[in-house]
Amino acid sequence: MKWSFETVLYLMIMTFMSVALILDHGDAKNATYIEIAATEAALKVPPQGYITPQIKQEIKDFLAGTRGMDPVLVQIDGTNDIALRKVRGQGNDTITLTIKYPRKYYIFFDGMKNSLYTAKRTIKTEYTGR
């Protein structure tokens, strides 16, 4: 009887661990796509000198189209206003871009832990300030 109980318990724990690994693999894909979105946006930011609303919308559309992420939950922070842009030749001529998306970890027996995916990029501006 003891052996049967131990075997059932072992199989149950291994099943939960397998499910956790499969869910973690899906989470890794989400993190990769957020990193891709941040890199593509970083290539589009320098000519304007800040993160335009069009770039923000492209990021949200990309994440919604590829991974089905909710565009409302995508947070885009950084140099997102013309008043915040940095001018070349001054003390700080970088543009910052941060993309965040909520992440949920499912733990054994219906437990859940929340955190954020975060991708951060720093870009040198090409705006001359004239």
Image (tube, helix red, strand yellow):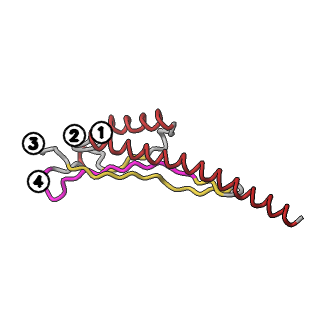
Query: In the shown orientation, is residue 81 left or right of residue 29?
Result: left
44 vs 7: above or below: above
Q: Dot 3 corresponds to which residue?
A: 130
Queried whether the magenta region covers residue 110, the answer comes back as no
- Which comes before the other along the chain, label 4 or label 2? 2
Q: Residues within 10 Å of mark 4 (few under 14, many from 20)?
A: few
Give the Cα distance between marks 1 and 3: 19 Å
Tell me what residue is drawn at x 19 percent, y 47 percent: 125
Q: Secondary structure at mark 2?
A: loop
52 vs 83: above or below: above
- Which comes before the other along the chain, label 2 or label 3? 2
Query: In the shown orientation, is residue 9 left or right of residue 27?
Result: right
Q: Residues within 10 Å of mark 2 (few under 14, many from 20)?
A: few
Give amino acid for label 3: Arg
- Which comes before the other along the chain, label 1 or label 3? 1
Give the Cα distance between marks 4 and 3: 12 Å
Pointers 2 and 1 in contact (CB under 8 A)? yes
Q: Dot 2 corresponds to which residue?
A: 48
Q: Residues within 10 Å of mark 3 (few under 14, many from 20)?
A: few
83 vs 17: above or below: above
Q: Give the image location of residue 130, x and y in percent.
A: 9, 42
Give amino acid for label 2: Gln
Q: Dot 4 corresponds to which residue?
A: 89
Magenta-highlighted residues: 88-104
Q: Give the image location of residue 84, x and y in percent.
A: 25, 50
The disc label shown at residue 80, or none = none
Q: Dot 1 corresponds to which residue?
A: 52
Q: Give the image location of residue 48, x and y in percent.
A: 22, 40
Give the Cα distance between marks 1 and 4: 22 Å
Q: Give whichever of 62, 72 is nearer the camera.
A: 62
